[in-house]
Image (cartoon, helix red, strand yellow):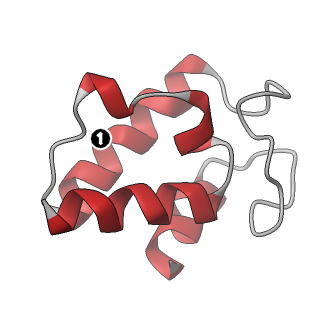
Amino acid sequence: MDEILEILEELNLDADVSSCDTLVDDGILSSLDLVTIIAELSDRFDITIPAREIRNENFNSAAAMFEMVERLLDE
């Protein structure tokens, strides 16, 4: 979880990334931010994020991203 928070903090978003659960829904994350996050998660966790996983609910919060990464690591 710490690595995900680190990725989000590096984006210098205008939100408390540790508690916000509407990062995509409220437009806090831009499409470029999402591309950056997907690339960082893929590199750091050695996973491939398939297109079916690129949904708002998987990127609305750090916790949701963590759950997605855990799920993909288990596959």
Looking at the image, which residue is at 87% across and 45% down? 14
Say which residue label 1 marks. Answer: 39
Identity of the residue drawn at 22% across and 31% down:
50
Which of the pair 20/9 is nearer the observer?
20
Along the line of sight, which residue is nearer the eye, 34 or 52? 52
> Disc 1 residue type?
Ala
In the image, taking residue 69 as reference, residue 21 lies left or right, namely: right
Image coords of residue 48 (percent x, y): 15, 43
Examine the rendered structure and indicate whether residue 9 appears above or below residue 1: above
Counting from the top left corner in percent of width and height, residue 56 is at: 60, 30
Residue positioned 72% across, 50% down in the render: 12
Residue lying at the far top of the rendered structure: 31
Residue 16 x, y percent position in the rendering: 85, 61
Q: Give residue 70's quadrant in the image.
A: bottom left
Whole-percent x, y for residue 17 in the image: 75, 60
Q: Image point 15% across, 54% down: which residue?
A: 47
| Closer to us: 33 or 69 | 69
Q: Is residue 15 left or right of residue 36?
A: right
Question: Quadrant of the rendered structure where residue 62 is?
Answer: bottom right
